[in-house]
Image: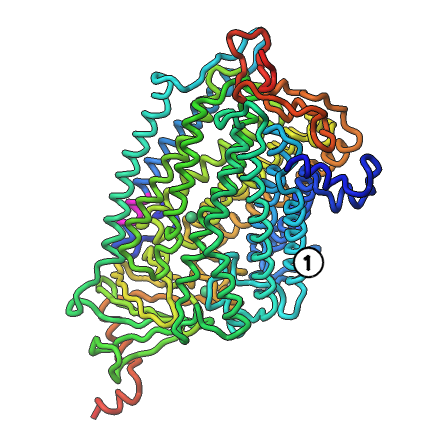
């Protein structure tokens, strides 16, 4: 099947003279599709970041015109926060982490020439691109973009008379549903390819952790998204056909949506977390020249987390009006899931022990992932404990908590991956100096944004409010100062992203040429040329050992590539 | 932690604050411990010329202990947190005061205002002396209230931060709960669930007053029809 893939991609254009269109736009090559996802995700991140800039400016300086946007109306505000969340999760974290890295890395790291279903892969990206276009169009239709929060709870999302965005809400829903279709197609490919196309000799325990994590994430996604797609169809019909699935006036129940949404929504956290943790595991082993501590334990922990993640969804609904007795079960399951996640953190820390640690840019990002994610992890305990959630629910404490999980995942993890695999992707090196400037600027500013938001949440500031002047207890100068600090830090952080973009595009064309294996890493992608040609290898590799045999006592060199017979 | 930011003005506010403190100290210790070990390793095991990294699989029994012992300790800490969370939760959400020792109040959310129906002097809802107010809830200090929460249109959330109280309002349902204020004052009532473009202005105030003042307010504001019927 893989051979067939090669043929299909070469198609009628002959072997070497492919036009720009067939090489970069309608390609079935997994690497190009991975890049397409990654660049689309980066473009969407710019849009999502701009939205954050606009609504944070409104919060720091309420009522004043925002440079580059103008005055922010309540309707604008709601649409901005809704679409910021939607974009960052569905159009940045998912495409870059799973589809981008998944597509690029899976065939290269398991040693085959392409995905098993290359045309489905291409279709997946095309549907994804369509979904992004539909979402962007939804901002400009009459009534403006959807503003009912990324969770889209009905009845607000179900009726135009409540939301006042008749077209915006439907287009938003269609865009999200299309995005799910794209990732279902991608997921099928990732799982099938990893199970069927591994290089000869690569056993289950020889698969690099990042690939395992992408596979488990894909399975979690495919297993959890079904109910939500059903929910989306029902919501679409409530919006446009006049059904009443979520309308209590017609015998429906708005809470039903919440169950369907969070049954997907909580595993989704792990869908994006796992690939980021995988990236971090691979980088940490390379730059500390260490074997991953307890590979099998990590793997079982990942499976355990995956299974448990299906049993915690109602911790989002403690005070949503469900039977209060249910909260006990979900408090227990939620605190239980802290165990495997804590265990993964312990394993990563243990991996550093006795290492030879080099603080290169990718390693800095990988270490920062762990340090920052720990904050996200421990603050989650407050929210998982039903009694404490009564207070914290829907405050900025929740917001700060999940940004301390999602930012490490979608931004820190992604920068770790991009800076690490850049030489393989483009055959050139990024600048280490500017990489470190970008790293420190981003990390320091990030903490200055969200620590004040934890404090605002503790003070009772609730979410999705465009102007706190209507709430005397929240309109105090002390709290306003915290809002201004957070916004200023955001401006600094966004400015530092220019450093990355310049470094990225400059190095793409002018960076130092990269060798095959610049880091002396073990995994198979480093045995292909940088960048790998179409088909990846002239002769497909064979595998003799696991991916993390660094500093083996029997060897003179401190690495032992997976494909070396001895 | 929370008392630092805002008063604890209900009987269960201090329970929640206690639970938050318990969690803060448990996770705080873990957090500091992890970060200290983590940064210590990063500094201690920096690359030095000529020093090779150790080869540790982490698969042997005495190595796995480094993971399995903290694993068990985390589990034990979880038990304490679950116990605390459940106790507080049962008190707030699963225990309703007896009708004889409490007064009902109806809270209705709609786009984008709160309507409060006070029981009036007779202490009963749906009687002629009920007092209806918009965006202002008046209660008596040190007295139990049972709220009946309703919504006219979309989801709202009845939230009083100084009480540490939050509850979603759902159209088509009446959700019951309770509170008892422990200090007088005027505080924010929020809608803590996005409910459309006016969500940001859906603010109300709660006025907590001593029994005498509250009684005076009730007799001043009792509906005119009722006053006409009862005053000779
Ligand atoms: Cu969750
Ligand atoms: Cu609201």
Give me the residue at 52% from left, 59% from top.
Answer: A149
B163 with respect to A189 (left or right): left
Q: Where is residue A222 in the image (x, y as percent from the top left)?
A: 50, 48
A548 lies above or below A261: above
Is B18 magenta? The answer is yes
Specify the segment rendered in magenta. B15-20
Q: Can residue B2 be seen in this view?
A: yes
A423 with respect to A394 (left or right): right
Give me the residue at 65% from left, 30% from top.
Answer: A421
The quadrant of the picture occupied by the C terminus of chain A is: top right
Give me the residue at 58% from left, 15% from top.
Answer: A560
Q: Mark 1 points at which residue?
A: A69
Depth order, front residue of B224/A393: A393
Q: Position of residue B178 (x, y in %)?
A: 26, 63
B70 lies above or below B165: above
Q: How are the colours assigned in the image? A: rainbow
Q: How crowded is mark 1: few (under 14 residues within 10 Å), some or many (20 or more)?
A: few
């Amino acid at each position: 099947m893989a051979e067939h893939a090669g043929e299909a991609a070469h198609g009628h254009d002959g072997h070497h003279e492919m036009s720009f269109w067939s090489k970069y736009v309608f390609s079935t090559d997994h690497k190009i599709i991975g890049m397409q996802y990654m660049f689309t995700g980066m473009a969407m991140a710019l849009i999502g970041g701009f939205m954050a800039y606009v609504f944070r400016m409104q919060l720091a300086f309420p009522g004043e015109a925002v440079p580059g946007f103008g005055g922010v109306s309540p309707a604008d505000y709601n649409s901005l926060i809704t679409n910021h969340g939607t974009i960052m999760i569905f159009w940045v974290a998912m495409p870059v982490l799973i589809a981008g890295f998944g597509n690029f890395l899976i065939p290269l790291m398991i040693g085959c020439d392409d995905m098993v279903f290359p045309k489905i892969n291409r279709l997946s990206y095309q549907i994804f691109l369509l979904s992004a276009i539909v979402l962007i169009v939804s901002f400009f239709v009459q009534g403006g973009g959807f503003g009912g929060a990324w969770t889209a709870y009905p009845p607000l999302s179900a009726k135009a008379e409540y939301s006042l965005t008749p077209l915006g809400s439907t287009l938003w829903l269609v865009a999200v549903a299309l995005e799910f279709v794209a990732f279902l197609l991608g997921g099928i490919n990732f799982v099938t390819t990893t199970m069927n196309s591994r290089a000869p000799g690569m056993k289950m325990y020889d698969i690099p952790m990042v690939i395992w994590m992408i596979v488990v994430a894909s399975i979690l996604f495919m297993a959890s998204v079904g109910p939500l797609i059903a929910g989306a169809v029902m919501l679409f019909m409530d919006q446009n056909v006049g059904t009443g699935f979520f309308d209590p006036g017609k015998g429906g129940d708005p809470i039903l949506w919440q169950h369907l949404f969070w049954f997907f929504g909580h595993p989704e956290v792990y869908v994006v977390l796992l690939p980021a943790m995988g990236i971090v595991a691979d980088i940490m082993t390379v730059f500390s020249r260490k074997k991953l501590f307890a590979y099998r334990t990590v793997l079982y922990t990942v499976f355990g987390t995956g299974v448990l993640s299906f049993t915690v969804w109602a911790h989002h609904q403690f005070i949503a009006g469900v039977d209060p007795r249910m909260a006990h079960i979900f408090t227990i399951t939620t605190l239980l899931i802290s165990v495997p996640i804590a265990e993964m953190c312990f394993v990563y820390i243990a991996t550093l022990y006795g290492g030879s640690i080099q603080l290169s840019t990718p390693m800095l990002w990988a270490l920062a992932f762990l340090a920052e994610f720990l904050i996200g992890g421990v603050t989650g305990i407050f929210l998982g404990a039903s009694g404490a959630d009564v207070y914290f629910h829907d405050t900025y404490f929740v917001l700060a908590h999940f940004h301390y999980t999602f930012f490490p995942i979608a931004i820190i993890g992604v920068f770790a991956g991009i800076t690490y695999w850049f030489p393989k992707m483009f055959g050139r090196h990024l600048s280490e100096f500017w990489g470190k400037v970008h790293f420190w600027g981003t990390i320091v500013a990030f903490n200055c944004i969200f620590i004040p938001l934890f404090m605002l949440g503790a003070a009772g500031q609730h979410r999705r409010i465009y102007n706190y002047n209507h709430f005397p207890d929240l309109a105090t100068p002390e709290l306003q100062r915290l809002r201004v600090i957070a916004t200023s830090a955001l401006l600094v952080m966004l400015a530092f992203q220019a450093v990355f973009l310049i470094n990225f595009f400059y190095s793409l064309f002018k960076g130092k040429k990269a060798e095959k294996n610049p880091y002396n890493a073990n995994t198979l992608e480093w045995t292909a040329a940088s960048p790998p040609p179409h088909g990846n290898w002239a002769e497909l590799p064979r595998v003799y050992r696991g991916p993390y045999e660094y500093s083996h006592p029997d060897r003179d060199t401190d690495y032992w590539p997976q494909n070396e017979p001895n | 932690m929370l008392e630092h930011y805002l008063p604890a003005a209900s009987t269960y506010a201090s329970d929640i604050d206690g639970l938050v403190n318990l969690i803060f100290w448990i996770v705080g210790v873990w957090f500091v411990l992890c970060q200290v070990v983590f940064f210590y390793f990063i500094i201690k095991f920096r690359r030095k010329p000529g020093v090779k990294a150790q080869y540790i699989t982490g698969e042997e029994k005495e190595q796995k202990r480094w993971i399995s012992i903290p694993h068990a300790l985390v589990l034990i800490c979880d038990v304490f947190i679950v116990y605390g969370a459940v106790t507080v939760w049962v008190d707030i959400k699963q225990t309703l005061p007896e009708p004889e020792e409490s007064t009902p109040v109806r809270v209705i959310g709609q786009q984008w205002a709160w309507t409060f129906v006070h029981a009036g002097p007779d202490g009963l809802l749906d009687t002629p002396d009920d007092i209806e107010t918009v965006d202002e809830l008046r209660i008596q200090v040190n007295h139990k209230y049972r709220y009946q929460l309703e919504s006219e249109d979309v989801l709202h959330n009845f939230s009083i931060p100084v009480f540490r109280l939050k509850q979603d309002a759902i159209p088509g349902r009446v959700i019951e709960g309770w509170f008892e204020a422990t200090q007088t004052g005027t505080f924010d009532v929020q809608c803590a669930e996005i409910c459309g473009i006016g969500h940001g202005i859906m603010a109300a105030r709660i006025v907590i007053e001593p029994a005498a003042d509250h009684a005076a307010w009730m007799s001043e504001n009792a509906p005119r029809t009722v006053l006409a019927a009862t005053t000779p």
